[in-house]
Amino acid sequence: MYDFQSIVSSAGRMVQIGRMCVNKGLKEIGLGSAEADVLMFLYSVGDGVRQDDIVAGIEVSKAAISRTIKSLEKKGYVARKQNLCDRRSYVVWLTERAWKAEVLVKRQYEDLVNAACLGIPEEKVKEVVELFKHVVNNMEKYRLDAS
């Protein structure tokens, strides 16, 4: 039997520490980790993304993404425009302010990953990433089968 408590506790703590580090690193520009996650998604896939695609890409609830995008919009990091093809949805665009913050935001995540992987051989890191993906797939299958 697997030690479920250790797995959940370690995974939760990794996420918690990561969020704390990103929050601290981005405090000077008024961003939190949830907002940075949205910006990182937009930096990686490009500008002009439907809000629903952000929900699917980050795998967070519609309500949470909506709140985060409203906050980013209020802070001047994104602009939201009605989708011309589907008036019920919105398209999110990065502003000049967001593009200026790109290097700093990305550096927070790079520094965090580098710190987390310190002293671990690259092949082991790749192995762990593949294991995490496998675990996530197993859990998603279990979730879908249970519903």
Image (cartoon, helix red, strand yellow):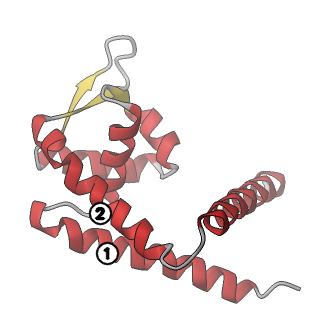
Asked whether 33 or 74 is in front, the reply is 33
Percent coordinates x, y for residue 117 in the rendering: 50, 73
Quadrant in the picture for the N terminus:
bottom right
Give the number of marks: 2
Disc 2 to disc 1, C-alpha distance? 8 Å
Residue 59 image offset from top left, x and y in percent:
52, 49
The answer to whether residue 121 is left or right of residue 29 is right
> Which residue is disc 2 drawn over?
108
- Which secondary structure, mark 2? helix
Determine the residue positioned at 57% across, 75% down.
120
Residue at coordinates 70% horizontally, 63% vertically from top-left?
127
Q: In which quarter of the view is residue 51 placed? A: top left
Label 2: how many residues lie within 10 Å, few (<14), some (14-19) or many (20+)? many
Residue 57 against residue 133 in the figure, above or below: above
**Res. 77 in view:** no
Q: Residue at x 52, y 40 (%)?
A: 56
From this view, report whether residue 33 is shown above or below residue 35. Answer: below
Horizontal side of 80 relative to 120 (left or right) equals left
The residue where tag 1 is placed is 21
Q: Quadrant of residue 19?
A: bottom left
Query: Label 1 is placed on what type of residue?
Result: Cys
Query: Dots 2 and 1: beta carbons under 8 Å?
Result: yes
- Name the amino acid type tagged 2: Gln
Q: Position of residue 123 (x, y in %)?
A: 66, 63
Sequence-wise, which precedes: disc 2 or disc 1? 1
Horizontal side of residue 18 vs 75, given as left or right: right
